[in-house]
C-alpha cells in the first residue's frame, strides 16, 4: 500500500497542523499526543514516509531506525520517567487500531501503567 501523504502526521511534519514539539532532529519529530492517556504521552515519528512498523523496519535506513529509538530514550530521560519506568507502544494495522498511517511510537509514563494488555471484548 502506498504512503498517504494526507495523513495527520504528514501534515504536522509539513507544518500544516500545529503540534506541541518536545524533540526534533534531522530524522525524528516528537510531540505530545492530542489525547494524552498518561501524564507523559509523547508520539515519536520518523520524518521519512513510512506507514507502519512493518514498512519502517523493511525500508527505513539503519540511521533512521537508530534515531527513533535514541530519541525515545532521550525523551524518557528529559521527562523524568527513565528511572520510574515507561512504556512504548506502536500500534500496527487493523487489529491494533492503528489510526494514523505514519509509523509512530507512543511513549507513556508518569504514573503506574497497570497490566500490559487487557482481554479483548467482542467490539475491540
Ligand atoms: P494510533 O494510530 O491508534 O496508535 O494513535 C494515534 C494517536 O495520534 C492517538 O493517540 C491520537 C493522536 N493524534 C491524532 N491526531 C492528532 C493530532 O492532530 N495531533 C496530535 N498531537 N496527536 C494526534
Image (cartoon, rainbow, N blue to C red):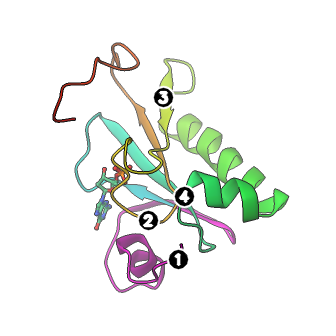
Q: Which residue is mark 1?
A: 3
Q: Earlier in the sequence, mark 1 or mark 4?
A: 1
- Please report contact status of discs 2 and 3: CB closer than 8 Å, yes or no: no
Q: Earlier in the sequence, mark 3 or mark 1?
A: 1
Q: Nearer the viewer, mark 2 or mark 3?
A: 2
Which residue occupies 42% across, 48% down? 42
Q: Which residue is mark 2?
A: 101
Which residue occupies 44% across, 52% down? 43
- Is 19 colored magenta in this rendering? yes
Q: Position of residue 12 (x, y in %)?
A: 40, 76
- Please report contact status of discs 2 and 4: CB closer than 8 Å, yes or no: yes
Q: Nearer the viewer, mark 4 or mark 3?
A: 4
> What distance separates the C-alpha of mark 1 from that of mark 4?
9 Å
Q: Is residue 92 above or below residue 89?
A: below
Q: Which residue is mark 3?
A: 87
- At mark 1, the secondary structure is loop
- At mark 2, the secondary structure is loop
- Please report contact status of discs 3 and 1: CB closer than 8 Å, yes or no: no
Q: Nearer the viewer, mark 3 or mark 1?
A: 1
Q: Nearer the viewer, residue 62 or 35?
A: 62
Q: Position of residue 93 (x, y in %)?
A: 44, 51
Span shown in magenta? 1-29
- Please report contact status of discs 2 and 1: CB closer than 8 Å, yes or no: yes
Q: Quadrant of residue 4?
A: bottom left
Q: Earlier in the sequence, mark 2 or mark 4?
A: 4
> What distance separates the C-alpha of mark 2 from that of mark 3?
21 Å
Residue 16 seen in the current view:
yes
> What distance separates the C-alpha of mark 2 from that of mark 1?
8 Å
Amino acid at each position: 500500500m502506498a504512503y498517504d501523504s494526507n495523513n495527520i502526521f504528514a501534515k504536522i511534519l509539513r507544518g500544516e497542523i500545529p503540534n506541541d514539539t518536545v524533540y526534533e532532529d534531522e530524522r525524528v519529530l516528537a510531540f505530545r499526543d492530542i489525547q494524552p492517556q498518561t501524564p507523559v504521552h509523547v508520539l515519536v515519528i520518523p520524518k521519512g514516509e513510512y506507514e507502519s512498523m512493518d514498512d519502517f523496519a523493511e525500508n527505513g535506513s539503519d540511521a533512521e531506525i537508530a534515531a527513533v529509538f535514541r530519541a525515545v530514550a532521550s525523551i524518557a530521560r528529559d521527562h523524568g520517567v527513565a528511572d520510574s519506568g515507561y512504556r512504548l507502544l506502536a500500534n500496527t494495522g487493523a487489529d491494533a487500531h492503528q489510526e494514523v498511517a505514519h509509523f509512530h511510537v507512543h511513549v507513556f509514563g508518569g504514573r503506574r501503567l497497570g497490566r500490559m494488555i487487557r482481554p479483548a471484548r467482542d467490539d475491540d
